[in-house]
Image (spheres, grey):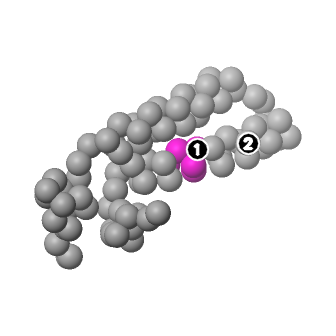
């Protein structure tokens, strides 16, 4: 079941932004591996850095998900957030 303000959550939630950035790293990593295997010399440190960044972004997204974001969540007593 979706939250009542799912559009606002997609636009403003830090957890969604961080997961989108982690997805970008997940997509770039195999592309980088293919390009380096085909045309360039392979650099293991860049691959390790990309994997580490993906993991750190995923952890940051989990942490961001558990914190209240006032613009999205509204008050904690069940009042929906103000539009705008």
Q: Foreground residue, 15 or 47? A: 15
Local packing at callout 2 (Cα closer than 10 Å; few below 14, some 14-19, many 20+) is few
Residue at left 20%, top 76%?
84
Residue 11 visible somewhere in the drawing: no
Image location (x, y in percent) of residue 69: 23, 52
Q: Foreground residue, 6 or 49? A: 6
Residue at left 54%, top 36%?
54
Image location (x, y in percent) of residue 62: 41, 39
Residue 83 visible somewhere in the drawing: yes
Image location (x, y in percent) of residue 11: 37, 66
User: How many tags in the picture?
Assistant: 2
Is 29 magenta? The answer is: no
Say if 59 sits above or below 80 in the image.
above
Q: Earlier in the sequence, mark 1 or mark 2?
A: 1
User: What segment is highlighted magenta in the picture?
Assistant: 21-25
Residue assigned mark 1: 25
Local packing at callout 1 (Cα closer than 10 Å; few below 14, some 14-19, many 20+) is some
* Image disc number at residue 30: 2
Residue at left 16%, top 53%?
76
- Residue 66 occupies quadrant: top left
User: What kind of element bears circle 1?
Assistant: helix
- Residue 63 occupies quadrant: top left
């Amino acid at each position: 079941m979706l939250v009542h303000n799912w559009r606002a959550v997609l636009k403003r939630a830090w957890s969604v932004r961080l997961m989108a950035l982690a997805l970008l790293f997940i997509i770039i990593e195999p592309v980088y591996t293919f390009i380096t295997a085909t045309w360039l010399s392979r650099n293991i440190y860049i691959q390790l850095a990309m994997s580490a960044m993906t993991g750190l972004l995923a952890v940051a997204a989990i942490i961001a998900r558990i914190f209240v974001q006032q613009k999205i969540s509204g008050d904690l007593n069940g009042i929906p957030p103000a539009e705008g």
